[in-house]
Image (cartoon, helix red, strand yellow):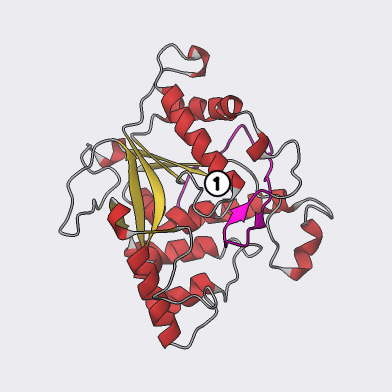
Amino acid sequence: MNTADQRLLLVHAHPDDEVIGNGATTAKYVAEGRHVTIVTCTAGEMGEILVPELAHLAADKDDALGEHRRTELEDAMAALGVTDHRWLGGFGRFRDSGMKWHEAGHAVAADETDERAFANADLTVAADELVRIIREVRPQVMATYDQFGGYGHPDHIQAHRVATYAAHLAGVRSYKTELGEPWEITKIYWNAMSESRMREGLRKLREAGDDTFFEGMDPDGPMPHFVTPDELLTCAVDATAYVDRKMAAMKAYPTQIQLDGPFFALSNNVGDTAWGVEFYRLAQGPLGPVGEDGLETDLFAGL
């Protein structure tokens, strides 16, 4: 298949998720002439604000963070070269649900949520918005979160559910023909982080004297929920040549990512492979050709 005919759909919950999870892959594929469509389900209205002078944008104050993150996302898309970004159902249709931390170290639903919260949305209503996009774009490959949303955030879990359901509905010939001609996505992946890479990165950071990244975590101890055992991984996209674009896109989100925080500390101390190689789990479709490590090197492998 010619790269110009290859189409990838990425489904994410909030602005900045797409950079953290798929930024290098996205920059690489766009540069190679493949079509990348990014769908963001909420504007991230409930996110933490790391810039003190913008604290007034918070949901319990001016409630204007979503509009601000909209401009941050636009800057990030420009850094990655993406020209096809969509807000699920249009900007503001679904609101960030918020979250709180469970004592076990993962996210759970907040005590109170807005009635417009994405996590509260009717699954079919939200899925239909994505069905429309799938049938228009006609991607061969889609990537989103696993069933736990990586770390338990209710919006990530809902994004997984919506993407999974929409992918099924989009291929049903008799389902809501007004949403477009049916289309079946051949390969579906879940974003992942390699356990061995995570442990290696932590070791190098600790050796360099940096204890800020996941403070107190032992490189040889239990890993966070979003870390995936290597035996479950299916694909590793090596986009180290495009790490600078991923980092530029991260810097487009100053309200969410500290410029002197763990992402950049890890990059500076460990090297480009820390963020330039992105991992995936195949959730649907054929396994393509693999390398000596047993992993595909391309999300379109075998197509």
Callout 1 amino acid = His
Above or below: residue 220 compared with residue 97: below
Numbered marks: total: 1
Q: Position of residue 18 (x, y in %)?
A: 50, 51
User: Can you see residue 110?
Assistant: yes
Question: Is 296 placed left or right of 50 in the picture?
Answer: left
Q: Residue at x 78, y 52 (%)?
A: 59
Could you say whether the residue bearing mark 1 is in a helix, strand or loop? helix
> Which residue in the protein does label 1 denote?
156
Q: Which residues are magenta?
A: 81-109
User: Can you see residue 40?
Assistant: no
Q: Residue at x 63, y 65 (%)?
A: 254
> Which sits in the foreground, 2 or 97?
97
98 part of magenta stretch: yes
> Which sits in the foreground, 104 or 21?
104
Q: Position of residue 76 (x, y in %)?
A: 54, 56
Above or below: residue 19 compared with residue 119: below
